[in-house]
Image (cartoon, helix red, strand yellow):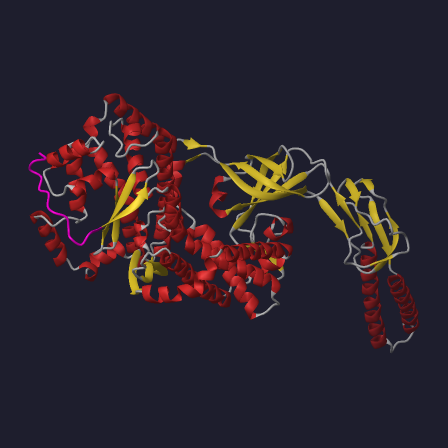
Amino acid sequence: MQQALELNALREDLRLYESGSDSEGAPIWAIQDPVTNRFYRIGWLEYECLLRWPNEPQQIADEINATTPLRVDAEQVADFAQFLEMHQLIRPTQRTRERMLKQAHEPGWRHWKWWLQNYLFVRVPILRPQRWLQAAMPLVSPLFTFWAFALVVMASCLGIVLVARQWDTFTHAVTDMLTPAGMLGFVIALIVSKTLHELGHAFVATRYGVRVAHMGVAFLVMWPMLYTDTGESWRLKSHRQRLAISAAGVTTELALAGLATLAWALLDDGTLRQAMLYLATTGWVLSLALNVSPFMRFDGYFILSDILDFPNLHERAGAAARVWVRRALLGFEDAYLEEYSTRQRRALVAFALVTWLYRFIVFLGIAVMVYLLFFKLLGIFLMVVEVIWFIGRPIWSEVSVWLKRRQEIKPSRRFMLLAFFAGLLLLLTIPWKVEVQGVGVAHPQRVQTVYAPFPAQMQSLHASGAIEQGAVLVSFTEPELFARSSRSDATLYALNKRLDGLMAEAEGSDARLSIRSRMQEQLTELASIEEERGRLAIIANFPGLWLDVDPYLSAGAWVNSREPVGVLVDPQSWVIDAYVEQRVVERLEVGRPARFYIDNQMGYVSAVVDSIDSTQSRYLPFNMLATRHGGSIAVVEAEEQTKPSEALYRVRLRLNEPLPVLQEQRGRVYIEGARRSMLVEAGKSLMAILIRESGF
């Protein structure tokens, strides 16, 4: 088979560079394709093959075996030949020419299929910066010294310390950024930060003699991002130099963020201080949260690859993980494409599995974002394309291999797989108990807070302690009421006397009617006064404990109507006002058991669902549940009241036993919900989403 293999000569424009040695000390080289500006790392075996190229595979293998310590067979040489042909590094064969001719006639970016497959990520080169980068190197060279590094680190640490001392002001300033003007400032800071990020890559690459082929803009889900082509860094022998180039962007952003943090801490309020805040938050958040991630092909990935001196980390880890999955799941006896130690292979497999999970979540999030960015019909179409192309296609590519090789699966392994999936389906179908979580406040069910009905003078005040129902808690007196009562009595007496005198006069009928009307007014006034007098004595509506009585209050003191005199509490009856999300309300039923865990305490208290509100809570009566007071419910201010920012429903629970401390207790509630099948619930949720989003 090897004799029939056509080994064409290498392309004359290829370049070969020494790249030092790998982690085991073996020499390595890099082949540069100047047409595509791509680099291919090869080892000692491949290098020896190139020295004897072109020739018959068997003859090349024999010569290598005879002149070097390597032991090679013709099949390995043939595999390397296929690699060179696949990447078009040799003179094209007839088959390759036909394929290239076919590709040349394809419309490429002018065809809708190209945009359908590449709309999520498109690179647009803009400039070739090598000349002015070299011209500017003398100006930026001082930034590469140890003292510049030490100064930036000390300034950043000082800025962090100063900001920590005024943390509340800093967090409030960050919150104020969530405005149209703040978002505009954030975008400007993002442009400045990312421009310096890419210049960091470019200047460090230039410093090590690496040509920056071009700089431009990449569109990630239609969002523009700057990029710098430093692919020629693979020419460098030292992986530490490649690491310096990879880390230069993040280092530049962090340095900018550190200096901006110090500037914000030292400047007075104003436009310049606000600009420093934008630069600081942009650098810290995006550098640490996005660029450092090694699971996407951002700076973090290249930094990790250079630290490990392990190029093509994603591809090689993915290949090892696919073999591991096939061996572990299906029992295939596939050999690993590369030889690794057991520890190294496990690390690669674990990294690949985490990368797949991370990318699945990211691509799913991108699909939702694509749907939301465009009008509904186009959004649905692009979301489906994104899910199929970036999630479904890789999965199906691997599953199709399993299906083609299903005859290799042993009957026992096949039975185990069928049993596993049948059991999984059964678990998803069986109705399981579910717990509904929420936050709430435990408080006595019956509370009577006593206020003076109006500004009045205290006549008597019951001492703190146990109170029977109907006992007088506090009584007041109001001299003005007695004065009004005396005036009304005197007026009524005078009118009554005058009426008696008019009874003897035959012509006094009109006067008598007037006097009777005035007497009725005075009687109404007396009834009103008596009613107000009745409010001056406040009695206990239920038996309980009379608490929070001001020890400085006594008979004769004047009390206004805005300050409470005391609180009557029933210590034997406690309830919890819990708040749960709208999507889980339907799972609750009256009478279901629940557990209440008080914050910062061990154990729980049993409770039972007493009632469930049929409408969502418009306001939050307990401020301690709001995030600004240490709670977990996000709120907004509306009409001088606290309003939950999301739809919440109040669930009233009755505690099975009273709490020992007579004060409101905040905590988490776990309520036993009705049995639900996970498969049915997922179907209902999916149908609800489809119905909600079906309107155009």
Position of 542 with respect to 230 (left or right) is right
Position of 449 with respect to 597 (left or right) is right
For the N terminus, the image quarter is top left
Residue 586 magenta: no
Q: Residue 560, located in which quarter of the rendered image?
A: bottom right
In this rendering, is residue 483 above or below 300?
below
The answer to whether residue 177 is seen in the rendering is no
**Observer-nearest of 680 and 291:** 291
Characterize the magenta stretch by its predominant secondary structure.
loop
**Observer-nearest of 433 and 301:** 301
How many tags in the picture? Answer: 0
Residue shown at 33% from the left, 62% from the top: 217
Q: Where is residue 399 in the image (x, y as percent from the top left)?
A: 25, 37
**Observer-nearest of 279 and 371:** 279
Q: Magenta region: which residues?
A: 1-15
Q: Position of residue 240 (x, y in %)?
A: 39, 47
